[in-house]
Image (cartoon, rainbow, N blue to C red):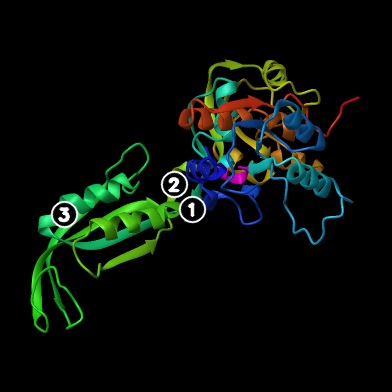
Amino acid sequence: MKLKDLCSYLDSAVPLSFQEGYDNSGLQVGLSEREITSAMITLDITEEVIDEAITHGCDVLVSHHPLIFNGIKSLTGKSFTERILFNAVKNDIAVYSAHTNLDVLSNGVSRKMAEKIGLEEISVLSPSEKLLLKLVTYIPESHLEAVRNALFEAGAGVIGNYDKCGFATSGTGSFRANEMTKPFRGEKGKIHFEKEIRFETILFSHLKEVVIKALLDAHPYEEVAYDLYSLENKNAEIGLGCIGKLHDPVSENDFLKFVSEVFDAKGVRYSKPKGKPVIKVALCGGSGSSLLNHAIGSGADVFLTADIKYHDFFKTENKILLVDIGHFESEKFSREILKDLIIKKFPKFAVRFSETNTNPINYF
């Protein structure tokens, strides 16, 4: 298949519009029309990972952390990133990354962490806002079903675990066609009144172009009237972090030992123990200190994350056990998410995990 086929699928499965403004997810290196045969999945892209891809004949690297974060004004090989870019281009290896957009997915990084430690009743810790649009359009009664179904097929109408959600009300629309038109109903130069249905539904912002195209293709009018409204609603399925419950309570010490083993964390840091059993756990893959207040407010016994600063440990005020297992350790299972996504869509496409340990932190 072509590189653009893989990228197009990942761009929709892990929507680029979900990424933070500072991020750089998506295709970073590679010609979209190029034929590809195999991919290697990695957390980070290093010079060693590029060498490994060359050895195994992999022509695509799919990573969680983007290779290019900041603007590049020259390619002289003086920096870590420039050397990797040179090597990737020289050996015709494409680079694709899914970073903060993978973090916020309902089946994203934090959810994978929660599953690894056996949490139940998992939900999003900090739901995302402003990812939803409302579409309102006006359809002649005879074409309601056709247009509505086309919108649903394009991905509109999904609210949580429900799909094909919409609302319809009857009314009368009016219009007058000029001499340049071919009106579906009515006569040129005369005002026409038509029994129409006001139909409204909801959609994710990244689906806007696809849904509007479906509307225009299925609607019988030459000029289709529709409105798009940006919604303030939080989305319960999309957002940062997760919260859930252990099947059985455990002591704080046993919990620390357990997560150290699950994530192979060699240097777990934690705040002063509360001396109470652990049952409710909040967590966030990667740098999750910004969610500490969310975790405390949720009533969690523990907040499990990474990259906690010294002064953040004081903020717990014995309200929660704050646990830092390391950035690499908390996100290492993101590779499984990416591999599963690709295999689900392209079951015959060769995908392998990188065997290179890309964690830049060593423990004495």
- What is the CA distance from the residue labelled 2 to the residue labelled 1? 6 Å
Instruction: Confirm whether the magenta stretch covers residue 96.
Output: no
**Residue beneath the point at 54% across and 28% down:** 349
Instruction: Characterize the local packing of mark 2: few (<14), some (14-19) or many (20 or more) Cα atoms within 10 angstroms.
Output: some
Circle 3 residues within 10 Å: few <14, some 14–19, many ≥20: some
- Chain-order first, disc 1 or disc 3: 1
Contact, mark 3 vs mark 2 (Cβ under 8 Å):
no
Amino acid carrying label 2: it is Asn
Label pair 2/1, CB-CB below 8 angstroms = yes
Q: Which residue is mark 3?
A: 144
Mark 1 in CB contact with mark 3 (< 8 angstroms): no
Q: In screen coordinates, is 197 left or right of 240? A: left
The x and y percentages for residue 174 are 13, 75
User: What residue range appears in magenta?
Assistant: 97-101
Comes first in the chain, label 3 or label 2: 3
In-front residue for pair 57/221: 57
Write down the residue under mark 2: 235
Q: Say which of 162 and 52 sits in front.
A: 52
Q: Which residue is mark 1?
A: 129
Image height check: is 129 above or below 56? below
Instruction: Please tell me how many numbered marks the rendered image carries.
Output: 3
Q: Which mark is residue 56?
A: none
Name the amino acid, label 1. Glu
Residue 179 in the image: state x and y as whole percent: 17, 83
Q: Answer with mark 2 or mark 1, whichever residue precedes in sequence.
A: 1
